[in-house]
Image (spheres, rainbow, N blue to C red):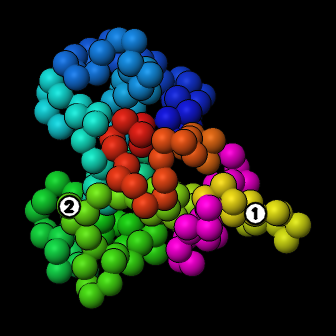
Amino acid sequence: ILSLMVIMAVSLGISVCAECEFQDVKEGSWFYDAVNVAVEAEVFNGTSKYEFSPHKPMTREMFVTTLARLNKVDVSQYTSSSFSDVKVGEWYAPYVEWAYRKNITDGIGGGKFGVNKTITRQEMVALFYKSAADFGENTEIPDQFKYDRSYDKGDVAEWAVDGMKWAQMVNMNKTFSQSTISLAKVQSTHQAT
């Protein structure tokens, strides 16, 4: 996703944020440019004026917010909540409701979205896949496409298979190194930028 963010930002003419002063994002860090581009594009805000918290686990609501902002969704019309753990008025509530209404997510079951639950790689990819379809991207997987399950060592949940196939087809999985990130491991904020 790091590579995707930089490519998208450059293609949209977005430059590196000259005003960003995150004390925890040092020049020379592998994610420095991506974080600054994402902030300049208003996809990420950081956790405070001077902190981005790149090593903090990313939650499901943070990621859904990122998807909506990446696609410049106007969430002002989403003023209710369909999940018992999403309180109206919270910063993420309209983004979660948008994702629900657009069939990008149906939560984790039991009427809950999974607020404060750290997002996994397969969840990220599944949400990316569903949002891409919502925004008119071609997410059709040709019958002749050969999905290489060995990349993920067969650890893909059934609900995530189509998203993982699509990610592999569009080469998104190169962003996630097999040696450093597994499907079930926690994803941090810098891995999502």
Residue 116, disc: 2
* Secondary structure at numbered mark 1: loop
View extreme (right): residue = 144
Question: Which residue corresponds to the image point at 52% horizontal and 29% vertical from the top-left?
Answer: 6
- Nearer-N-terminus badge (1/2): 2
View extreme (bottom): residue = 110
Residue at mark 1 to residue at mark 2: CA–CA distance: 32 Å
Q: Nearer the viewer, mark 1 or mark 2?
A: 1
Question: Which residue corresponds to the image point at 16% horizontal and 74% vertical from the top-left?
Answer: 85
Residue at the disc numbered 1 = 147
Residue 7: x %, y % from top left: 58, 30
Q: Is residue 186 left or right of residue 129?
A: left
- The magenta segment is 153-172
* Secondary structure at numbered mark 2: loop
| Amino acid found under the numbered disc labelled 1 | Tyr
Residue 133: x %, y % from top left: 60, 64
Relative depth, front residue between 8 and 175: 175
Place residue 107 in its image quadrant.
bottom left
In the depicted structure, whether residue 101 falls above or below residue 140: below
